[in-house]
Each structure stands twice: as structure tokens, then as C-alpha cells.
Image (spheres, grey):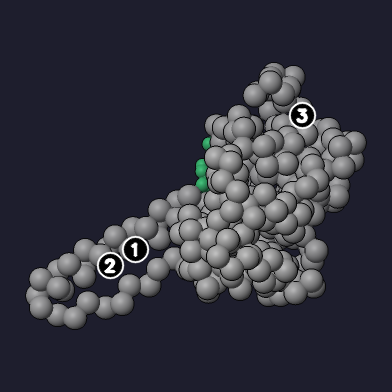
Amino acid sequence: MATGRTHRPATRSRGIPEATVARLPLYLRALTALSERSVPTVSSEELAAAAGVNSAKLRKDFSYLGSYGTRGVGYDVEYLVYQISRELGLTQDWPVVIVGIGNLGAALANYGGFASRGFRVAALIDADPAMAGKPVAGIPVRHTDELEKIIEDNGVSIGVIATPAGAAQPVCDRLVAAGVTSILNFAPTVLTVPDGVDVRKVDLSIELQILAFHEQRKAGEETAAGDGAVPAATPRGTAADGSADQGPDGDVPAVMPA
Ligand SMILES: NC(=O)c1ccc[n+]([C@@H]2O[C@H](COP(=O)([O-])OP(=O)(O)OC[C@H]3O[C@@H](n4cnc5c(N)ncnc54)[C@H](O)[C@@H]3O)[C@@H](O)[C@H]2O)c1
């Protein structure tokens, strides 16, 4: 058993570094916006700016995909969307369950962005018997008694946990025992999972604390500059360029500082 982190080597078996994988969704988001505007081609500089990534890094990332663009023309937007989607496994439909349908779980269920990116909400699951059968986002909530059957019937491999912290580990254990191999955890707790199970966590309060750290630094620099002192270098959230993508407790944060 190992504590909650993504059990993956720094370089995947197909030779794409984990830091590149973490940037692929940023490129895909920017490319999808271009595609929606029917933009046919894009230069590495334009795409890098839209994705918030350094253009040399982008070219290196795309070389792992075997995509080099055409000099003077740039990259074919539609083809890159296809290539990145295929690399990320988004060309297939991923059934997802959300467990814990309170404020957050209901908001996630109502978020249209999952379905449009290939993540179908197969079921909403909650332990409160009073919620069973009540529709949230048009989907009737199912009771946790049915969790294993739901996972099996729908071939679910991705589970989202939005329960209170104290319930998250038992829920995680049940999901994993039922066959789920990827967990997106919103509960403020570190999950323990067996090898082969990926855990990503989202903690907005940690992101806010990192921003507060930078705000404090900026305020300190202004004061120091006012004093005529040389300001200290400001460390930045650098997960998007792969140099610091571990959370404070070793988990991999799913929200990457840009
Ligand atoms: N990561 C973030 O940025 C972030 C933001 C907001 C909330 N949260 C966390 O998300 C979680 C949910 O927050 P909320 O405001 O929606 O809480 P909430 O109290 O509104 O909802 C929790 C739901 O979980 C259900 N539940 C409890 N035990 C369960 C179990 N064993 N199995 C299935 N369902 C169970 C409850 O019946 C309830 O419907 C909390 O852990 C909270 O700290 C995280």
C-alpha cells in the first residue's frame, strides 16, 4: 500500500514524460477554442501563448506526439486536437461516478464540461437514503448500497469523491475494490490506494494559500524596492512546466497553477 499519489513513473512507457502529459490538456483547451472559431492552423508561438506555456517547451512536447508542424504554416489545428485527444484517451467515452451529492457533488453533476470532453456521468451516489431517487442534474441519485453494482454494470474506472473528509477513505476503498482505478478526490484528506490506482486531488483552498503566498511576496518586494533593496526572486507555481507538480503532501494536485 502506498499513500495517495499518482503511481506512475516520471516517463510513461510510450516515452511521453509526465510533465508533458500534464500540459496536453492545456494545449487541448486552447486548440479546442481555435477549432470552435474554425481557425485552420496555428503557430507554436500563438498556441504557446494561448496555453500559457513556453513555445520551445511546446515544440518539444509535440515532438513526443510525432507532430512537428510545417515551417511557415504552423500546426494543423484539427489534427492536433485529434492527436492530443487520442494520446489522452479522450477518443473513447469514460463513464464516471460521483460519490457524495451535496453542494459540491451537485455542482459537479451540473457541470456540462465533463460530457463535452468524453466523461459521461454514469451515476450519482450518496449515502443519504432521503436523497435516493431524487434527480440532480436530471440524473436520479442512487444509494451507496448499490455502489458495487453500478461500477460493474457501467464498467466505471473513474470515480469522483465529494464526500466529507471522514467518509472519503472508506468510499475510496469500496470504489477500488469494485474495480475503479482512477480517483479524483475533492475531500480534504490524503487517500491510501494500492499500486495501479491513480489519485488526483483538487483542493481550491490550497491553491488560494499558494496565491496568498505570492501576494505576500509581491507586497514584500514592493516594500523592499521602496527601500532601495534588491527584490528576491519570486518562486512561481510551476506545475504546468513540470518542475514542481507535487502537492505539499505528495499527492498530485489536479488543479495546476498556470
Ligand atoms: N477540493 C475543493 O476545492 C473543495 C471545495 C469545496 C468542498 N470540498 C470538499 O468536498 C466535500 C463535500 O463538500 P460539500 O460542501 O458538498 O458537503 P455536503 O455536506 O454538502 O455534501 C456531502 C455529501 O456527501 C454525502 N455523504 C456522506 N458520507 C457519505 C458516504 N460514506 N458515501 C456517500 N456519500 C456520503 C452526504 O450525504 C452529503 O450529501 C467536503 O469534503 C469538502 O471539504 C472541497
Q: Image check: 42 left or right of 131?
A: left
- Three-letter amino acid code at the position of disc 3: His
Q: Quadrant of ligand 1?
A: top right
Q: Is residue 237 something one can see in this rendering?
A: yes
Residue bearing the label numbered 2: 217
Could you tell me the amino acid type at mark 1? Phe
Q: Residues within 10 Å of mark 3 (few under 14, many from 20)?
A: some
Callout 3: SS: strand
Q: How busy is the neighbourhood of tag 2: few (under 14 within 10 Å), some, or many (20 plus)?
A: some
Residue 110 to residue 47: above or below: above
Type of the residue with mark 2 = Arg
Q: Quadrant for residue 19, please give it.
A: bottom right
Q: Quadrant of residue 33?
A: top right
Separation of marks 1 and 3 at Cα, in angstroms: 41 Å
Tag count in the figure?
A: 3
Residue 191 visible? The answer is no
For image coordinates 55% across by 56% down, the residue present is 42
Of pointers 1 and 3, the one earlier in the residue sequence: 3
Q: Horizontal and vertical percent for residue 17? A: 67, 72
| Residue for badge 3 | 143
